[in-house]
Image (spheres, grey):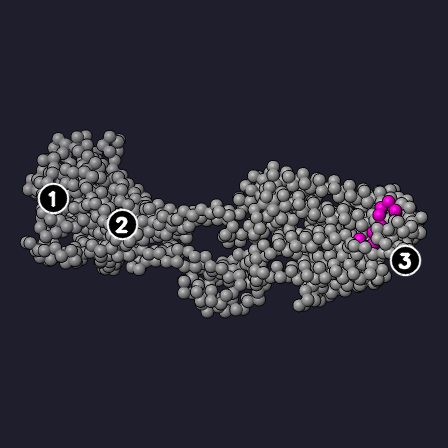
Amino acid sequence: MRKHHGDRLIVVLTVLLMFIGLLIIYAIGPQRANLLNSVYGFSYSDTYFFWKQLLSFGLSLGAFWVLSVVPYNLVLKHGSKVLWVGFIACALLAIGGWTHIIAGTNGAVRWIDLGPLGSVQPAEILKFGVLLYLAVFLGIRSREGRVNDLKATLLPVGMLAAFALLFVIVIQKDLGTGISLTAIVATMLVVAGINRKIIFSLFGLLLIAGTILIFTSPHRIERVLTYLEGDNTSTSDAESYHIEHAKIAIGSGGLFGVGIGDSVQASGYLPEAINDSIFAIIGETFGFVGTVALIALFVALLMRLLGVMDHMVDVRLKLLAAGVFGWLGAHVILNIAAMIGIFPLTGITLPLLSYGGTSMIFMAAALGLIFQLSKYTVHASHIKEDINEDSRSRRGVGRTRYASRRGA
Amino acid sequence: MKPELRKGSRSRILAGIVLAIATIFVFRLFYLQVIQHDHYVALAQAEQVKRDRLPASRGEIYALNGSTPVKLVMNETVYTVFIDPFVVNQSKEVDELRQVMKDVAGGNLLSTFEDSVNATDSRYQVIAKRVTRTQAEKIKEKHLKGVRFLAVSQRVYPEGQLAAQALGFVNADGVGNYGLEGYMNDELSGVDGKLETVTDVSDVPLTIGSGNIRIPAKDGKNIVTTIDRNIQSKAEQALADGIKRSNATDASVVVMDPNTGKVMAMANLPTYDPSKYYEVKDGAVFNNATISAPYEPGSDVKTYTMATAIDKGVAKATDTYNNTDYIKVDDRTISNATKGHTGVISFQTALTWSLNTGFVTLAQRLGNGTEITKTARDTMYQYFHDRFKLGQKTGIELANEAAGIIISPDDADGNAVRYSNMSFGQGLDATIIQVASGFSAIINGGNYYKPTIIAGSVNDDGVYMPNEAPQPIETGAVQASTSQQIKEMTHVARSGFAGIDKPGYYIGGKTGTSQVIRNGVYADDETIATYLGYGGSDIDHPEYVIMVSIHGDHKVLGGSVDAMPIFSEISNWLLDYLKIQPKG
């Protein structure tokens, strides 16, 4: 298929969202530094978090660009290697944690410290690996018409997912990343065309697994109980402290917000103000207008991803777009839902905005890849007749898309 | 390829899910941010706005040095040092902290220091108290993480223990206890200011927001007492001398100006160090006995009976009665402590030798001449209670004043026997300040001044603002002529002791030896020795009234032997100190 202009809106939305995150961190970074310095005895400078985030911003732009120019075939070809790297990194992390070579936070080891280069979160590599690998695997099965085949498709995918989730949820105790991994796999399966019966049984299976996960951790039980209390929680209760402060931040923002740099909740009242709770800070800073606009930006970006997905002929690429959609969608929905008190807290970041390099870089990379794919879309009306496709079906004029399928 | 996939129908489902959830989000956000906005603003305010107290500085207390105020109680800022053990251990500066605290804080370091450092679960541990500013600066210089200081104001006493019981002390909560500190606590405390600021979670004020409120503190009043530091110091030393001389356990003295009611000195021994009030084991030492320990005043009150009889015109100093050393009242027989002055003697002799029979006779003469009738009792009550104000609080500006008691003749117990006892000072309870104040009225011409310890205040500019001259709260307590006669009689009584006063002055006084009531009966082996007197250049100008009491456990102390020398020591010194010119 002949390459044409990509969907520039994907670039615009991605950069815009990352820029908003950078702006917020610029505004509340000094308060964050001040809090950590005074309460925990660190010595961060006022601009520490801003510079770190600016670096992440730059690296993310780089990752976006790289994945938008490195031919997707090449990327897909090495998908399984990325998956391996992810697994190995996770395994090393687990070993490092057990042997206490790597120090953990909050009772779990999630990061590998690379000294001055910062730290890297192996789970993000794993996520990316799963995305690439499943795109290829399910693409082949789909073309073979064996998507619903238990042995050929469902079991291997299930095994892969279970293995990845074992590392992420059980060993790293990172439910948030686990949920986004699950969302990636589930979205890909749905788009790959597994039948409804299997979807429902998978859904049931997830529900049971979720329930078990909740009840095996007192911490999660508390979060669910807090959630069930709804808006009746109070700040004096340690368990509901986080969600209550998120709601206070959002609610006190009003229609137009308190303005940039005037967030009080960020001065230490709201936990994780620059990470998981950044949406609440946006709510306080920019008000209802700001939060709705932000949701609109995310929805627009998600719709663009679906647009690319719809206009892909190659199933692998379609699944790739589906996976990224699931990834971004799950993060956005679960993060915001938790912040506004309609879903329990899962410790999941708001993609592209939250402070923290690794997740942002990989998200940007994934979006970069989709941007590349958007250069190879065809008009929807032609997909239905793909068997008898001719040159009229192409949005651009160029080589046939059969050429692009080589190696799949 | 399956048709379903080609059609992309599932993408529509996914889009639908996203849009549906986004719609829910928008509704929820509208609810939180628009409908519930005020509610959340209120919640935010509740925790973000800190209402801080701007502590008012407590008023200082001055004594007089002649007529110039000098500081008796001052404020000093000291620091309570506390640590955040979590941060201290995190910063790995534990050894440095230990070294610095031992070098600098030394004795102020709490014994629980090591436990505090090791309490890593805690975020707040006090490690040292009452650290001075200099010490605190030295610790601050080290910039140790997790070490904080809390400024605390504490009282300092440049004159040490001087007038401790009159002053009282200020406890750790900044509340005055006992004495002037207790009585004038509200005035001394001032009014704390208010500060309302938006703060971060560690209560550090933020520059965000415009609703900050600041009402400055109104500092407490600086009070100047009537206590003269030199007289007070002399009085305390004289008490100490007296206790040593008589091998007594406790003694009290009040020195006051009979013409104004101003207390120039007020002391009790044993006393305590108000800067270390927390080290006091026996709380009784906080009590100011001169105002809060009623006792049977004994023979000093004979001057009151004499004054009453003279004022009523039923007797004068030279009038006589037949002394048999015994006198019968109803079914009781009252005897003299000093016997042998029998026969027809004057009331001056009765006063000089402190003969009880003379004063019972006076009480009878206030009645029908042979009985202490209701009329006699009413008269005595009127003078003792209403005019000389025994058995009621004087209203001196000191905490914990006791009223004492005088039984009214209308009371069943207010019978002739009781009033015969009262005529020589038994059967009533009064405090030293009451007896001295009533006596002041008797010798100053009949004006009762409320005893006071407050001379004025020092304003914010450090200028002494004396109160207006006190006015008597009662005039004509006795007639001027009565006053003259009592001064004469007490002067004559005192003149019986040769060579105790500087020549050329007019000094008068009355001894008292009160029995101590133990378990409801008079104890044989224990007395309170007192002396009540005045002094001045001549009979018309009494300048001071001094009342002394001294007591020892299981000790019989006499007014003339044990209390009078204390009076004389203070009196003779005062004549010089007050630069009183001799006339006689």
Q: Main secondary structure of the magenta part?
A: helix
Q: Which residue is mark 3?
A: A403
Q: Can you tell which of label 2 and label 3 is closer to the viewer? A: 3
Q: Quadrant of residue B518?
A: top left
User: Where is the C terminus of chain B found, in terms of image quarters?
Assistant: bottom left
Q: Which residue is mark 1?
A: B486
Question: Which callout, 1 or 2, points at the residue further toward the start of the chain?
Answer: 2
- Magenta region: A373-383
Please tell me which residue lies in front, B384 or A175.
A175
Q: Are marks 1 and 3 on the same chain?
A: no
Residue plotted at (53% across, 44% down): B45
Question: In the image, B128: left or right of A346?
Answer: left
Cα distance, mark 1 to mark 3?
A: 136 Å
Specify the amino acid type for callout 3.
Ala
Q: Quadrant of residue A82?
A: bottom right
Q: Position of residue B290 (x, y in %)?
A: 26, 48
Determine the chain carrying the residue at label 3. Answer: A
In magenta segment, residue B264: no
- Picture disc at residue B457: 2
- Label 3 SS: helix
Total tally of numbered discs in the picture: 3
Residue plotted at (33% across, 56% down): B74
Residue plotted at (78% across, 54% down): A6
Specify the amino acid type for callout 2.
Ser
